């Protein structure tokens, strides 16, 4: 554990919201009929909000379900920013693709063509346009068109490879007729360093808002924030990125909204066995979907693609090869079970059937968090000091073994917390500290049980210290295991039934209970066996804690403990 901490340079655990400061928002669902919302709808809302918060670059935010509520803890974020992230409800939009390009601007290719002679007296040279690179549409495997199906996206700028004008052909007479000399066409100046191609070169930009053209050229879809969580206006054209950051789009007004999707289900094709996604629409949505697929099916790429936008990003943009009436469709392609199920969930719950009200908003300042951390550490130090003094005053030499065991347990606990913090997303909070402080007494109790068993065996007067240590261990370990098992079961039950701070306390208590068992079995018992071989303990020294006076003996013969 120490080597792992050193390699990762993770010497301090990460702190939770109550110690580092931030905002906690509790959202409660509101339904039209006042009945409890469907469980699957709340789970999907949790996933969407979690993706939105994490997509904005906020590290270690926690989004969890608490019965029918959603609790969002965002460390280091102010109240207004937190509310802006979680108070909006995502909704699916289906929009026609007007233009598409790679995620970032491509560098201009350096010209290599040599100057060509021209018979014209005036210079005339226009470089021909090239096709724009074809990006992937999105991270979701896209589908191809089947009967009554959506087709696979092949987003491409589809620029005309024959763009540009041809140089006029020289038609001058020969020397005898004109005596004119052919002049070389001058080469156009090379592009400046760092120049990039126009992502809209060769694409039809008619009907697109000019402001969007500028935004489309400037947007970088490889950035961490690709626009997740942006609530797009269904009545306006937008610029959006694919969810995997491989492409950027200009999209038309929403043709179908997520409220018109009645269901989506992942399944397999009965003929090919490949994974597909079947979607169905409500009556109005079926009519809208049939109209848009009928209208764009004859258009040239990329305007024959229909993008599905969820929470500000394009999740899939299939090409429509035929009109799709009937109120149902299917998307097929290079799906796996996981990706097809994820897409079905996005399509099904893109428009959440829930509205949320802010039932509680709590802001914690970083200053207050530091004060709480300092208080927790002070209380833990005081508790540890009291236990150490008790062990030394009452058990004397044996108390040193207990103190060493406590030191090992403390080191193992701290190392475990640090490793969990940096590798499993665990964040140390005030309830965890309380649980760790309480566990000091639980850990010390295991040592006390063992020590008292050893004393009981010695008081019988017919056992050496070595034999007393082994016999006492066989009896004490059952008591220790039973006590720790009861404590661990209580921690599991408390963790399963509680939420928030109480669950954090239960987690810390369960963790330290497991560490207690490990330390007692792998450190305390072997150390006690080694101590039994020392004359200081075996002869019952006055400061050993095993002297005759403490063992209740009166005769000299009984006061001497024999070595093995």
Image (cartoon, grey):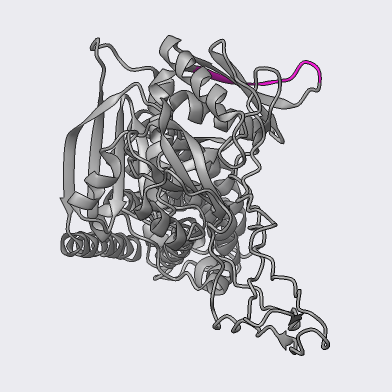
Considering depth in this image, is 553 or 120 the residue closer to the camera? Answer: 120
In the figure, is residue 309 to the left or right of 330? left
Indicate the position of residue 71 as horizontal and vertical percent values: 30, 37
Q: Residue 64 occupies which quadrant of the picture?
A: top left
Indicate the position of residue 386 as horizontal and vertical percent values: 26, 61
Q: Is residue 139 above or below residue 368?
A: above
Single out the residue that lies furthest toward the front: 177
Q: Which quadrant is the C terminus positioned in?
A: bottom right
- The segment highlighted magenta reads 263-271
Indicate the position of residue 427 as horizontal and vertical percent values: 38, 54
The structure residue drawn at horizontal position 25% and vertical position 29%, both measured from the top left corner, is 356
Considering depth in this image, is 470 or 406 the residue closer to the camera? Answer: 406
Considering depth in this image, is 124 or 4 the residue closer to the camera? Answer: 124
Secondary structure character of the magenta stretch overall: strand
Q: Residue 284 occupies which quadrant of the picture?
A: top left
Q: Is residue 106 above or below residue 175?
A: above
- Asked if one can make out residue 491 in the rendered structure from this viewpoint, the answer is no
The structure residue drawn at horizontal position 72% and vertical position 86%, both measured from the top left corner, is 184
Q: Is residue 258 magenta?
A: no
Considering depth in this image, is 477 or 166 the residue closer to the camera? Answer: 166
Number of marks present in the image shown = 0
The structure residue drawn at horizontal position 18% and vertical position 50%, both measured from the top left corner, is 80
Indicate the position of residue 7 as horizontal and vertical percent values: 57, 73
Q: Which quadrant is the N terminus positioned in?
A: bottom right
Q: Is residue 233 above or below residue 562?
A: above
In the figure, is residue 150 to the left or right of 334? left
In the figure, is residue 492 to the left or right of 70? right
Q: Is residue 264 magenta?
A: yes
In the figure, is residue 184 to the left or right of 491? right
- Asked if one can make out residue 312 in the rendered structure from this viewpoint, the answer is yes
């Amino acid at each position: 554990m120490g080597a792992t901490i050193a390699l990762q340079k993770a010497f301090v655990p990460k702190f939770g919201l109550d110690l580092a400061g931030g905002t906690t928002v509790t959202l409660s669902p509101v339904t039209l009929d006042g009945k409890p919302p469907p469980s699957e709808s709340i789970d999907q809302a949790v996933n969407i909000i979690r993706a939105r918060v994490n997509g904005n670059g906020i590290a270690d935010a926690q989004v969890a379900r608490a019965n029918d509520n959603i609790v969002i803890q965002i460390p280091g974020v102010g109240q207004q920013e937190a509310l802006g992230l979680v108070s909006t409800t995502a909704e699916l939009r289906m929009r026609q693709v007007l233009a598409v390009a790679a995620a970032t601007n491509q560098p201009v290719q350096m010209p290599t063509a040599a100057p060509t002679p021209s018979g014209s007296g005036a210079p005339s040279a226009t470089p021909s346009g090239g096709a724009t690179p074809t990006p992937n549409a999105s991270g979701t495997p896209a589908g191809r068109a089947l009967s009554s199906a959506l087709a696979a996206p092949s987003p491409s700028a589809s620029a005309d490879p024959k763009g540009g004008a041809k140089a006029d052909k020289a038609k001058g007479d020969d020397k005898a007729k004109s005596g004119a000399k052919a002049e070389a066409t001058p080469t156009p100046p090379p592009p400046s360093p760092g120049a990039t191609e126009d992502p809209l070169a060769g694409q039809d930009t008619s009907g697109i808002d000019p402001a969007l053209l500028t935004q489309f050229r400037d947007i970088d879809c490889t950035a961490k924030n690709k626009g997740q969580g942006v609530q797009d206006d269904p009545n306006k054209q937008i610029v959006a990125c694919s969810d995997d950051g491989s492409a950027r789009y200009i999209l038309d007004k929403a043709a179908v909204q997520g409220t018109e999707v009645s269901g989506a289900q992942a399944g397999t094709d009965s003929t090919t066995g490949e994974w597909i996604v079947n979607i169905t629409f409500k009556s109005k949505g079926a009519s809208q979907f049939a109209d848009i697929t009928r209208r764009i099916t004859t258009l040239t790429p990329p305007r024959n693609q229909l993008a599905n936008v969820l929470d500000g990003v394009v999740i899939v943009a299939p090409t429509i090869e035929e009109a799709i009436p009937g109120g149902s469709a299917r998307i097929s392609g290079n799906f796996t079970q996981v990706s097809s199920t994820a897409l079905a969930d996005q399509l099904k719950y893109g428009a959440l059937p829930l509205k949320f009200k802010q039932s509680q908003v709590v802001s914690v300042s970083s200053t207050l968090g530091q004060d709480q951390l300092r208080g927790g550490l002070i209380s833990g130090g005081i508790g540890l000091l009291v236990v150490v003094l008790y062990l030394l005053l009452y058990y004397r030499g044996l108390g040193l073994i207990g103190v060493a065991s406590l030191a090992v347990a403390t080191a193992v606990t701290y190392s475990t917390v640090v490793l969990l913090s940096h590798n499993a997303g665990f964040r140390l909070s005030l309830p965890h500290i309380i649980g760790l402080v309480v566990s000091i007494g639980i850990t010390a109790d295991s040592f006390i049980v063992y020590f008292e068993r050893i004393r009981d065996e010695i008081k019988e007067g017919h056992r050496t210290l070595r034999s007393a240590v082994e016999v006492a261990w066989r009896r004490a370990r059952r008591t220790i295991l039973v006590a720790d098992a009861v404590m661990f079961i209580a921690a599991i039950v408390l963790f399963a039934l509680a939420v928030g701070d109480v669950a954090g306390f239960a987690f810390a208590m369960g963790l330290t209970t497991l560490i207690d068992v490990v330390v007692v079995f792998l450190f305390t018992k072997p150390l006690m066996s080694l101590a039994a071989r020392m004359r200081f303990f075996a002869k019952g020294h006055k400061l050993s804690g095993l002297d005759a006076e403490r063992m209740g003996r009166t005769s000299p013969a009984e006061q001497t403990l024999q070595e093995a």
